[in-house]
Image (cartoon, rainbow, N blue to C red):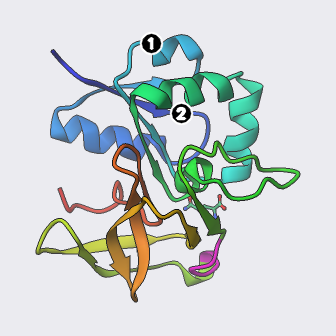
Amino acid sequence: MVMTVGILALQGDYNQHKRVLDILGTNNIYVRHKQDMKLCDALIIPGGESTTISKQIDNNNLRKPIIEFSKNNIVFGTCAGMIMLSSSSKSNNLTPLGLMDFSVSRNAWGRQINSFSDDLDLEFDNIRFHAVFIRAPKVSRMGKDLKVLATYNNKPVMVTDGHHFVCSFHPEIGSDF
Ligand code: GLN
């Protein structure tokens, strides 16, 4: 069976994810409507601006369908996507999906001007991974059943609950694949 990965294409760097999946030979489609999700086995929520992604999810009536989809399928969130998967408190312009039990502090790795890239430790491989951080969220609270997959300066920057995955950095930018 061929697996299809959906990439939420409302705002952000969804085209970078497509580029990587195409290079890897992974079947993928852009997701903009709930019908698109019927064709997917997993979903990527990309980096971008979480307030805009949150609004666009609601404008496109995708909130419930994504939450339903996440019950039986893997969702992977990078940067703004990580914010969307979190259970951080809601503010007037941002309502996270609450798919995983952790909270973040937005832009806590630095503002746009302090964007950086550096090598970090992966728990599941011996290589040092070169990661790009752009106004990245920092984990401020971790649920007890979460597992840290990568750290930077001893802080979790990639986390799973055994089902979904999130990372503060942009694995789709760069050439580590
Ligand atoms: N700072 C952005 C936000 O709060 C996330 C940045 C990113 O996705 N690179 O949504």
Ligand 1: quadrant of the figure = bottom right
Amino acid carrying mark 1 in the image: Lys
Residue displayed at 55% across by 71% down: 139
Q: Circle 1 sits in a helix, a strand or a loop, which is it? A: loop
In the picture, the disc for residue 98 is: none
**From the viewer's perspective, is 112 left or right of 146?**
right
Taking the spot 61% from the left edge, 41% from the top edge, the residue there is: 11
Residue 69 in picture, x, y percent from top left: 49, 25
The vertical placement of 57 against 148, above or below, is above
Nearer the observer: mark 2 or 1; the answer is: 1
Q: Amino acid at mark 2?
A: Ala
The residue positioned 47% from the left and 29% from the top of the image is 71
What residue does disc 1 label?
Answer: 38
Check if residue 19 falls in the magenta segment: no
The span from disc 2 to disc 1 (Cα, nearest Å) is: 15 Å
* Residue 154, percent from left and from top: 39, 87
Task: Count the marks.
Answer: 2
Give the residue at x 76% y 58%: 89
Structural crowding at the residue carrying mark 2, measured as other residues with C-alpha within 10 Å and reported as few (<14), some (14–19) or many (≥20): many
Q: Is mark 1 within 8 Å of ligand 1?
A: no
Q: Residue furthest right?
A: 92
Considering every residue shown, the one lying at the far left of the view is 126
Magenta stretch, main secondary structure class: loop
The magenta segment: 107-112
Q: Please, what secondary structure does the residue beneath circle 2 have? A: loop
Q: Quadrant of the N terminus?
A: top left
Q: Which mark is residue 9?
A: 2
Query: Is the shortest distance between ligand 1 and the CB of mark 2 under 8 Å?
Result: no
Where's residue 136, x and y in %? Answer: 55, 70
Classify the position of the C terminus by image quarter.
bottom left
Residue 40 found in image quarter: top left
